[in-house]
Amino acid sequence: MNYYELQLSLTDFDAWHDIFVAYLAEIGYESFVEETPFLKAYIPEQMYDGQQLQVLLNELQAKGAQISRFDLQFLAQQNWNATWEAQFEPVLISDQLRIVAPFHDLPTFNGLEIKILPKMSFGTGHHQTTHLICQLMLSMDFQEKTVLDMGSGTGVLAILAERLGAAHIVAIEIEEWSAENILENVALNGSQRITAIHGGAPDIPSQGFDIILANINKNVLLDQLPQYSAASAPGAVLLLSGFFVTDAPDLVAAAAAVGFQWVRTETRDNWAVVLFNKTA
């Protein structure tokens, strides 16, 4: 698959980089690298729309963002993955979890370690939302639980759930190439209890899941919450992430409408993860 790499230099990087990531994700950009003051964003060739991008950038600049440099590079299939791999750094979460790539040469780690082939799939742990949901998962009980991982990306959350003791995990990913990446990462980590499905909400099995993980974006989450409710076992736990702190109240209200009770919200750099219990 061919990609485009968008590189933006933001004058006030700290104030704007999260906002750019959120808006670019809404129009199809799948992976991001943040190297102050540069933000790099990647989108499949067939999804790139130059006019749509220009409208978005104009909108954000009208709101006060300042872009001092703009570059767009075409990455043919033979080189885009090498470019991504070169920028993939290990991720350490709470001294309990390390997410690495197979090519990293690192000292021994006493916590959990997950290896990810970084093939542009969302979910390497670098983004705040993946970091948040992994951190919360480390404090939860997964022993013998059945888990649904929606929008699985690299499969990192599914693999972590297995490492934490889950009995079976269903990982659903709408992008075909990303679903293939899940299988690669499952094999790389020796996972035995993960079923990867290329599909969306209609492909959620009818079984009652004990834990549902969904790190997508606000609009998709709002649309799919009824399906999550239908697929939940009594007393199930739901973890939602992929949205700004300011969007959390909308998701809390929508989740309550389908039987989920708010338990807690955690934040990181204006992003949020929200934990719910199924009550009805």
Image: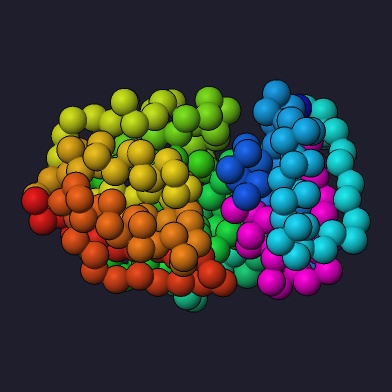
Q: Quadrant of residue 195?
A: top left
Residue 7 is left or right of residue 129, and the answer is: right
Horizontal arrangement in the rendering, residue 139 relative to residue 114 (left or right): left
Residue, far front = 62
Judging depth in this view, the residue of 208 and 256 nearest the camera is 256
- Residue projecting furthest to the bottom: 95
Queried whether the magenta region covers residue 44, the answer comes back as: no
**Total marks placed:** 0
Q: Is residue 21 magenta?
A: yes
User: Which quadrant does the N terminus fall into?
Assistant: top right
Which percent across, then down, holds residue 118?
64, 45
Question: Residue 208, can we see it?
Answer: yes
The residue under the point 53% across, 50% down is: 123
Residue drawn at (35%, 63%) of the image: 249
User: Which residue is pictured at 49% across the width and 37% down the height?
Assistant: 182
Residue 145 to residue 245: above or below: above
Residue 102 visible? no
> Residue 102: x and y, percent?
63, 49
Q: Which residues are magenta?
A: 4-22
Q: Position of residue 259 (x, y in %)?
A: 15, 51
Q: Is residue 280 left or right of residue 241?
A: left
The colour scheme is rainbow
Question: Residue 245: x, y in percent?
Answer: 46, 66
Instruction: Please name the residue shown 44% across and 49% down the image.
Output: 218
Closer-to-camera residue (55/143): 55
Q: Is residue 271 left or right of residue 212?
A: right
